[in-house]
């Protein structure tokens, strides 16, 4: 069982590269299931729309996770209640539209759970992510309720992500961080069999400042004339990881970083 996870898709550049390359990647790498974080996929570089979600699904994406930018386009609050393959953070208040967890059936009959979490440190207000994870595990057990479990931890702080990796070690197939847009080089299988990566990076133009136009970003730092952030439009690098998951245990046999195209080749 091979799972491809791709980090935050940023603007038109990221979407275009996924459109152009994903189906070939799925074929060449023998991928069984694709998850992407899509919270930056709108042309403005923040938010995601129904149209973009459906386009990503048509390109070969199975599930879209999000994070703090999930509501930046107003239409998402309505659409997310109708599309169970688009997730928002699980630990948002209970009255929040949509779901933060879903179970999806694979072609071979096996089931994969996808849990979308958001960190508490330097992020928008949400419920305590560790307390929410404890509650989640009371009713969701690997190899009992599903065959595989992938967790997207959308957060700013490395220590918070690492702690969550160890918390779920042996209880999930994969814990992967998103949000910083910079891929880390610490992909590994933890002691009890859970694959871990601190941050998957982004699917966007790396000749930029975390996906945003570099000249405008520099002007903002230098307090010169600048406008609201907008995405860079060069060729995107697709960044993430591939996990080989064991069908018997639901845990990871292998994890490898994945980078394709753009400036990071």
Image (cartoon, rainbow, N blue to C red):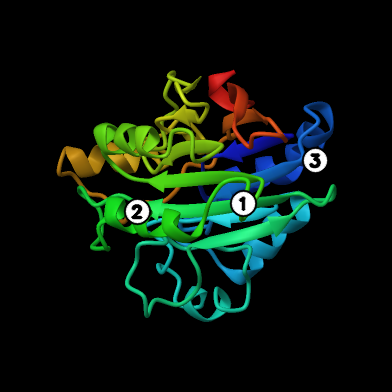
Taking the spot 48% from the left edge, 34% from the top edge, the residue there is 170
Q: Which residue is labeled 1 in the image?
A: 144
Between the C-alphas of marks 2 and 1, the distance is: 17 Å
Outermost residue to the left:
223
Q: Is mark 1 on a helix, strand or loop?
A: loop
Taking the spot 58% from the left edge, 29% from the top edge, the residue there is 241
Q: Is mark 3 on a helix, strand or loop?
A: helix
Sequence-wise, the earlier of marks 2 and 1 is 2
Q: Which residue is labeled 2 in the image?
A: 134
Image x and y of residue 211, in percent: 44, 40
Inspect this view and state whether residue 195 appears. yes
Q: Which residue is labeled 3 in the image?
A: 23
When asked about the image quadrant of residue 74, the answer is bottom left
Image x and y of residue 1, in percent: 74, 34
Inspect this view and state whether residue 9 appears. no
Mark toward the viewer: 1 or 3: 1
């Amino acid at each position: 069982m091979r799972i491809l996870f791709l980090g935050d898709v940023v603007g038109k550049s990221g979407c275009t590269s996924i459109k152009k390359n994903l189906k070939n990647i799925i074929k060449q790498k023998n991928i069984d299931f694709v998850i992407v974080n899509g919270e930056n996929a709108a042309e403005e570089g923040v938010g995601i729309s129904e149209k973009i979600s459906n386009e990503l699904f048509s390109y070969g994406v199975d599930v879209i996770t999000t994070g703090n930018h999930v509501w930046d386009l107003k239409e998402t609050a309505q659409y997310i209640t109708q599309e169970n393959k688009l997730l928002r953070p699980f630990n948002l208040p209970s009255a929040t539209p949509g779901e933060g967890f879903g179970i999806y059936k694979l072609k071979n009959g096996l089931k994969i759970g996808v849990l979308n979490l958001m960190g508490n440190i330097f992020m928008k207000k949400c419920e305590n992510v560790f307390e929410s994870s404890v509650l989640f595990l009371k009713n969701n057990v690997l190899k009992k309720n599903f065959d595989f479990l992938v967790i997207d931890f959308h957060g700013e702080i490395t220590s918070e992500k690492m702690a969550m990796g160890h918390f779920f070690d042996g209880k999930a197939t994969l814990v992967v961080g998103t949000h910083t847009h910079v891929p880390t080089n610490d992909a590994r299988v933890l002691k009890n069999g859970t694959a871990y990566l601190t941050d998957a990076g982004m699917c966007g133009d790396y000749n930029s400042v975390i996906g945003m136009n570099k000249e405008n970003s520099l002007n903002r730092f230098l307090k010169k004339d600048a406008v609201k952030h907008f995405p860079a439009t060069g060729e995107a690098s697709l960044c993430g990881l591939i996990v080989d998951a064991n069908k018997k245990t639901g845990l990871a046999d292998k994890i490898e970083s994945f980078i394709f195209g753009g400036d990071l080749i």
